[in-house]
Image: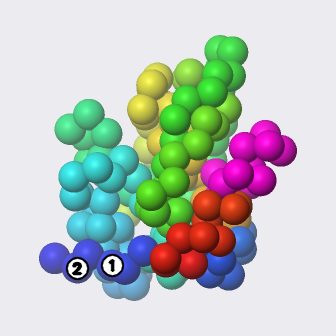
Amino acid sequence: MTVRKIRYYGDPVLRTETDPIRKIDENVRALVTDLIDTTNMDGRAGVAAPQIGVSMSAFSYNVDGKVGYVLNPVLEAVSGEPREIDEGCLSVPGLWCKTKRYPYARVRGHDLDGNEVVLEGEGLMAQMLQHETDHLKGTVYVDTLSKDERRRALREIRESDWF
């Protein structure tokens, strides 16, 4: 079991769009194992590869007792009226902000055998799908906040003991 260290806001890997996974090899298999091990802890709904320092398009999840991963995920559908919900991020420890998210989301990607994977849901699952696919595009949730909320969040980040 390898629980990897989480990269924090300010680390350039979190601002870089990830590379697609073109070939399933031992490195990708090890990445998936590390992602799942890193996610499979209390209070963690998902971890994207950049959060553990790897610029590859993959994330793992742990939502409502379902633990898994998706390679090369594409957020293909969201629906409903976006609403503000409390959201946090392992890469921005201790900070919770009102973040606009759609109540439903669907992601399509692949597993280690090349089979298509479709993950969809409402509530925490929808929030996680949007949050983790944002990470793969180089976006941290703080970037999506309203102007005033973002200003407050950045001030708290600058004043934090981990920044």
The answer for how far apart the CA atoms under marks 2 and 1 are is 6 Å
Task: Say the numbered circle drawn on residue 4.
Answer: 1
Q: At 56% from the left edge and 22% from the top edge, which residue is drawn?
A: 103
- Furthest toward the front, the residue is 159
121 in relation to 65, above or below: above
Q: Report helix, strand or loop for mark 2.
A: loop
Residue at 33% x, 52% y is 44
Looking at the rendering, in which quadrant would you find the C terminus? bottom right
The x, y position of residue 105, in whole percent, is 56, 30
In the rendered image, which quarter contains the N terminus? bottom left
* Residue 85 percent coordinates (x, y): 55, 29
Circles 2 and 1: CB distance less than 8 Å? yes
Q: Which residues are magenta?
A: 140-153
Q: Is residue 49 left or right of residue 32?
A: right
The answer to if 57 sits in the magenta stretch is: no
User: Looking at the image, which is closer to me, 106 or 159?
Assistant: 159
Q: Which residue is mark 2?
A: 2
Amino acid type of the residue tagged 1 in the rendering: Arg
The extreme top residue here reads: 80
